[in-house]
């Protein structure tokens, strides 16, 4: 029996997930920079005025409006950990996963609204969030969004149409959650052993689907809250989350969850506080060091986006880590 796995699609889907999480962390840091004193229970205000696309997921977005930034980071860390650990068949999604992706889509929509109004999350690029979302849509499903299908709509990076961007984020969330993690098989129609196995999986999926419907009811969604409120150490969570994302973006299918603790143990000295930017610099250094010391092949697309297109300021840290490791591990 020969399986043909669609390994490219999950890679792209998780690429988009990581990009949206980094954008959400930029939003949190931008908000916290405006505060004099930050406590563990501080919650960055999430204002989503564009109701044309968010009504269907209002309860999930509303929940993420109320929880603290520490909890938000903890949820993203957990969801990204699950998504990247199981590269082909991820853990079955729950309402918590769905709420996470709807929330980061809502954050991206808020940032886009701000960009359109002239308030930029990245002063060096007035279309930073729009460019990130546009290229994510292009990466996952170009035909639906760029005029090649009956249900497509016209979109450009510099568009100022909030409704158009709102629908774009709405569909992007569905692309990630619903279509990003499937695989397909070929040349198996006559294989009895496979179909017996497949039917067993089908029974399991039916049970899980019934459980999922129960979890998604508004009165049961809050039962996830005791789990996520256990995540309280923001600086440690932020460091793990950012390092995990940077590691994935730099190696792609070479990602191995077992290496994360070893990467985080690589010494890095910085005078900066435990902010997103300082965590990003530390992660870039450590991942660069780890890649060079282990002679791991880089994922060019992810690395170039992270270090050249999005966060050029951390490129020197990545290169320094690689250089120091190459000298030590000659």
Image (cartoon, rainbow, N blue to C red):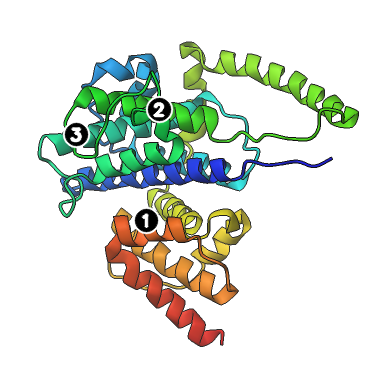
Mark 1 and mark 3: Cα distance apart in space? 22 Å
Pinpoint residue 127: horizontal percent, then vertical percent: 20, 44
Among all residues in the image, which is located at the extreme right? Answer: 192
Q: Secondary structure at mark 1?
A: helix
Vertical relation: 57 (above or below) 285: above
Q: Is residue 102 visible?
A: no
Count of numbered circles on the image:
3
Q: Position of residue 154 (x, y in %)?
A: 27, 28
Marks 2 and 1, how far apart at CA: 23 Å
Disc 2 and disc 1 in contact, CB within 8 angstroms: no
**Badge nearest the viewer, 1 or 3:** 3
- Asked if 87 appears above or below 328 in the picture, the reply is above
**Which residue position is annotated with label 2?**
144
Q: Residue at x 24, y 36 (%)?
A: 156
Q: Residues within 10 Å of mark 3 (few under 14, many from 20)?
A: few
Going by the picture, which residue comes out furthest to the left? 118
Closer to the chain start, of discs 3 and 2, is 2
- Which numbered dot is residue 305? 1
Which label was assigned to residue 159? 3
Q: Picture coordinates of residue 81 (x, y %)?
A: 54, 45
Q: What's the residue at 18%, 51% (across, down)?
A: 125
Q: Residue 255 or 126: which is nearer the viewer?
A: 126
From the viewer's perspective, is the residue at label 3 or at label 2 nearer? 2
Label 3 element class: loop
Q: CA distance from mark 3 to mark 2?
A: 17 Å
């Amino acid at each position: 029996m020969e399986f043909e796995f669609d390994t490219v699609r999950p890679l792209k889907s998780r690429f988009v997930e990581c990009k949206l999480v980094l954008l959400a962390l930029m939003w949190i840091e931008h908000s916290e920079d405006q505060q004099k004193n930050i406590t563990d229970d501080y919650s960055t205000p999430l204002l989503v005025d564009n109701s044309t696309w968010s009504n269907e997921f209002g309860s999930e977005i509303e929940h993420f409006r109320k929880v603290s930034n520490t909890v938000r980071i903890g949820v993203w860390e957990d969801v990204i950990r699950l998504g990247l650990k199981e590269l082909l068949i991820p853990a079955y999604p729950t309402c918590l996963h769905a709420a996470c992706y709807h929330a980061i889509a809502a954050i991206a929509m808020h940032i886009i609204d701000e960009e359109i109004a002239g308030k930029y999350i990245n002063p060096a690029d007035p279309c930073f969030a729009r460019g990130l979302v546009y290229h994510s849509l292009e990466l996952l499903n170009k035909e639906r969004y760029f005029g090649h299908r009956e249900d497509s709509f016209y979109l450009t990076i510099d568009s100022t149409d909030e409704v158009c961007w709102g629908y774009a984020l709405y569909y992007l969330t569905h692309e990630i959650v619903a279509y990003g993690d499937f695989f397909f098989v070929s040349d198996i129609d006559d294989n009895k052993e496979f179909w017996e196995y497949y039917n067993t999986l089908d029974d399991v999926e039916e049970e899980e689907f019934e459980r999922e419907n129960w979890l998604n009811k508004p009165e049961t969604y809050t039962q996830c809250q005791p789990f996520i409120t256990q995540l309280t150490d923001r600086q440690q969570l932020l460091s793990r989350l950012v390092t995990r994302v940077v590691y994935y973006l730099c190696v792609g299918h070479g990602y191995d969850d077992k290496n994360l603790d070893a990467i985080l143990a690589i010494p890095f000295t910085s005078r900066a506080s435990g902010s997103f930017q300082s965590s990003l610099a530390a992660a870039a250094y450590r991942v660069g060091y780890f890649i060079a010391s282990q002679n791991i092949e880089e994922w060019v697309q992810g690395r170039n986006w992270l270090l050249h297109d999005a966060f050029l300021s951390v490129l020197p840290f990545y290169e320094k880590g690689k250089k120091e490791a190459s000298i030590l591990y000659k």
